[in-house]
Image (cartoon, grey):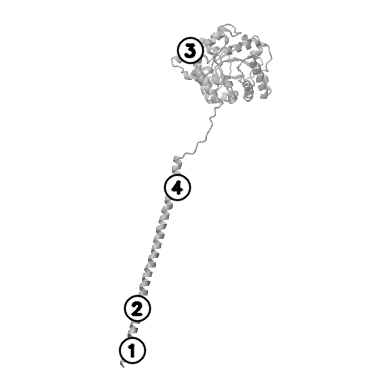
Amino acid sequence: MSERKENQDLEERRELRRQRRIRAQVTAYLIFAAILIVVVGGCILGVKAIASKLGDMKAQQEEAIEQAQLEAQAAMETTIAPPEEETEEVTTEDDMLSQIVDTCIAEMPLEDKVAGLFFITPEQLTGVNAAVKAGSGTQEALTQYAVGGLVYSSKNISSTDQISTMLSQTTSMSKYPIFLAVSEEGGDFNVVADALGTASCSNAQEIGTTGTSDVAYDAGITVSSYLNMYGFNLDFAPYCNLSDYSRSFNTDPTVAADMASAFSMALEDTGVSSCMKYFPIYADTDDGLETTDKTLEELREAEFVPFKVGIENGVDMIMISNASAPQVTGDNTPCSLSSVVINDVLRNELGYDGIIITGELGQSAISDYYTSSEAAVMAIKAGADMLYVPENFEEAYQGVLDAISNGEITEERINESLARIYRVKYADKIDS
């Protein structure tokens, strides 16, 4: 009995140990599971935190890289300038011409500058009755008065050798380039051809009736060929006014413009400067005074047309008429002395920047109302570049000098005109 009880007690103790062992294992498992859960959870949270942190770091890094790139680019733009293209400085013919002209004018004494504005006859220069040679008298006169130009008439021409020698010697005696001019229009209006008894071209009216500018161009070539041969470098032609007179190309402004421009271009294409005349109109009245009652608008529609075409083609010189145009200027001031005609209309409206020369200042339309000195000063103040054949050259010359001395005219104003004059005179000195 006691043995059975002992066995029973033993079994009970075994069962208790087994249950404690199970409980211990369960507890261990639970603890392990809890620990595992904690560990795994922590790992998951850690991974998320790390991933989040890495994402932030990557974003910051990308932002930093982008910023660095921007800063580097900006630094390159500010500190590393792109290399400049090497360009060769090109001196144009116009630049060379301007340099020559400026140098010439800068070296001229005032007296020579003023004399350079005058265009006179050989007789006015030397004081002789009819100049047919250039000797010591011409040399002395040109040394004292370095005039800008001399205009010759039939009394100065007796033979081809005589006029050729005279012009050649005059050129060599002049301190500066000088215009040697004549009025050779063709037909009955020729100085050289008439004096030498040689043939010239047809008159302007006959040329105009052909209706083709080629005929006018050929006429200009004919005239320039013998003017060049004798030594003339300026022709006071063509006559550009509209009329049925034989020296006029036509009454139609378009026809007259085509013909006059072609004649002018032919002269200049072959080395003889052309002077279109007379701007804006040539008119005569019974009382001996030149005048026109045409308005500015009427002149624009007709009389201006030949001159406008000439300006477009680069004519070297335009001569102003001594006519008065009260409907344009507001008074009876001759056009040659009018700033309205010269500056407002010809310079500003028509855009002409070549040489503007007055009509003959010794004509009664001017000399009856102004002294030689007054006319010369008025013309320069009005904008003229050259003064053509005043009644008294020495008086006119001194009048301009006095006007500069008293401040009525500035030396800069004289230089402006000289620049236009010498751009034409030195144009052939530039190699193309």
Q: Nearer the viewer, mark 2 or mark 4?
A: 2
In three-dimensional space, the C-alpha distance between marks 2 and 4, rounded to whole angstroms, equals 67 Å
Q: Nearer the viewer, mark 3 or mark 4?
A: 4
Q: Position of residue 121 (x, y in %)?
A: 57, 11
Amino acid at dot 4: Gln
Label 2 neighbourhood size at 10 Å, few (<14), some (14-19), many (20+)?
Answer: few
Query: Which residue is tagged 2?
Result: 23
Amino acid at dot 2: Arg
Mark 3 falls on what kind of element?
Answer: helix
Above or below, 138 relative to 314: above
Query: Which residue is tagged 3?
Result: 399
Mark 4 falls on what kind of element?
Answer: helix
Q: Earlier in the sequence, mark 4 or mark 1?
A: 1
Query: Which residue is tagged 1?
Result: 7
Above or below, 430 relative to 150: below
In three-dimensional space, the C-alpha distance between marks 2 and 1, rounded to whole angstroms, equals 24 Å
